[in-house]
Image (tube, rainbow, N blue to C red):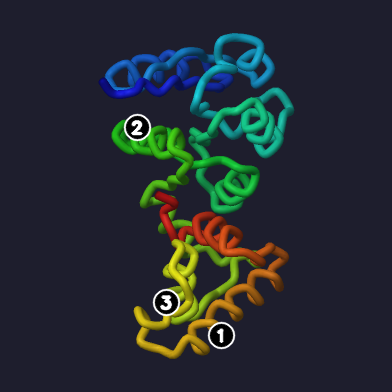
């Protein structure tokens, strides 16, 4: 028997919450256990036990999305932003606050289900459309990486040792290390920490270089 993933949703539009209930009822392995129009209301009820919370970016109550995301994470939930808004700044701010994924309200039901399952397993997920948007974004805090630096980042951030990265890229280990050092330097110059391999993985996901799965 497959495990049922308990899901909750926070949105200040009741019609959206009703629609989610109908949509998720048809997705195998998922159960919508609670809905609420605020973080406070969700955490005061059965929603506090949800494994994954779908969160609207703008709740209209004056709360800030990064703060809401951190509150839910502290309560033990994985967070997926489920929003009509999909600007690069909003996506990155949500991911930096700890959200596992970002799904727009125009994405397919299959993509929403995939994102929820990934989040329940501790993985990140960004839709292909959002990943393309992030890849083409020119925000000042998004470093422009050379093709070699980008390839080294993708390989190294997913767990490969530098020697394996070098072999995959057909370069010397010293050259592979130079690529990674340049990536770290560019991110530091942009004001973003890239000291560890975990940092690099997170940054690669945030900027659309990796899908986080």
Residue 33 lies, in percent from the top left, at 46, 13
The secondary element bearing badge 2 is classed as helix
Which of pointers 3 and 1 lies earlier in the amino acid sequence?
3
Which residue lies at the image location 50% right of the left edge and 35% below the top edge? Answer: 80
Which of pointers 2 and 1 lies earlier in the amino acid sequence?
2
- The residue identified by callout 1 is 178
Which residue is situated farthest in the top direction here? 45
Residue 120 lies, in percent from the top left, at 44, 33
- In whole angstroms, how far apart are the C-alphas of marks 3 and 1? 12 Å
> The N terminus is located in which quarter?
top left
How crowded is the residue under tag 1: few (<14 C-alpha within 10 Å), some, or many (20+)? some
Name the foreground residue: 89 vs 198: 198
Which residue lies at the image location 55% right of the left edge and 22% below the top edge? Answer: 11
Splitting the image into 4 quarters, where does residue 160 fall? Answer: bottom left
- In whole angstroms, how far apart are the C-alphas of marks 2 and 3? 33 Å
Which residue lies at the image location 46% right of the left edge and 20% below the top edge? Answer: 16
- Position of 62 with respect to 110 (left or right) is right
- In whole angstroms, how far apart are the C-alphas of marks 2 and 1? 39 Å
- The residue identified by callout 2 is 113
Q: Where 138 sits versus 129, above or below?
A: below
Q: Where 69 sits versus 18, above or below?
A: below
The secondary element bearing badge 1 is classed as helix
Q: Is any part of residue 213 visible from this angle?
A: yes
How crowded is the residue under tag 3: few (<14 C-alpha within 10 Å), some, or many (20+)? many
Residue 15 lies, in percent from the top left, at 46, 15
Q: Which disc is residue 125 wearing?
A: none
The secondary element bearing badge 3 is classed as helix
Which of pointers 2 and 3 lies earlier in the amino acid sequence?
2
- The residue identified by callout 3 is 165
User: Are dots 3 and 1 in contact, CB under 8 Å?
Assistant: no
């Amino acid at each position: 028997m497959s495990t049922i993933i308990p899901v909750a949703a926070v949105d200040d539009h009741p019609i959206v919450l009703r629609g989610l209930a109908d949509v998720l009822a048809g997705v195998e392995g998922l159960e919508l256990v609670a809905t609420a129009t605020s973080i406070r209301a969700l955490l005061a009820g059965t929603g506090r036990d949800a494994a994954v919370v779908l969160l609207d970016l703008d709740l209209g109550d004056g709360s800030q999305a990064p703060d809401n995301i951190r509150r839910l994470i502290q309560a033990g939930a994985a967070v997926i932003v489920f929003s009509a808004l999909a600007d690069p700044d909003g996506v990155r701010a949500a991911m930096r606050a700890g959200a596992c994924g970002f799904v727009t309200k125009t994405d397919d039901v299959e993509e929403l289900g995939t994102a929820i399952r990934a989040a329940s397993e501790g993985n990140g997920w960004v839709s292909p459309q959002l990943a393309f948007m992030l890849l083409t974004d020119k925000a000042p805090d998004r470093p422009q990486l050379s093709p070699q630096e980008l390839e080294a980042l993708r390989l190294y951030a997913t767990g490969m040792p530098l020697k394996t990265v070098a072999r995959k890229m057909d370069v010397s280990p010293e050259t592979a290390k130079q690529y990674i050092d340049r990536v770290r330097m560019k991110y530091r110059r942009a004001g973003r920490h890239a000291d560890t391999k975990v940092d690099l993985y997170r940054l690669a996901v945030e900027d659309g270089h990796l899908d986080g799965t």
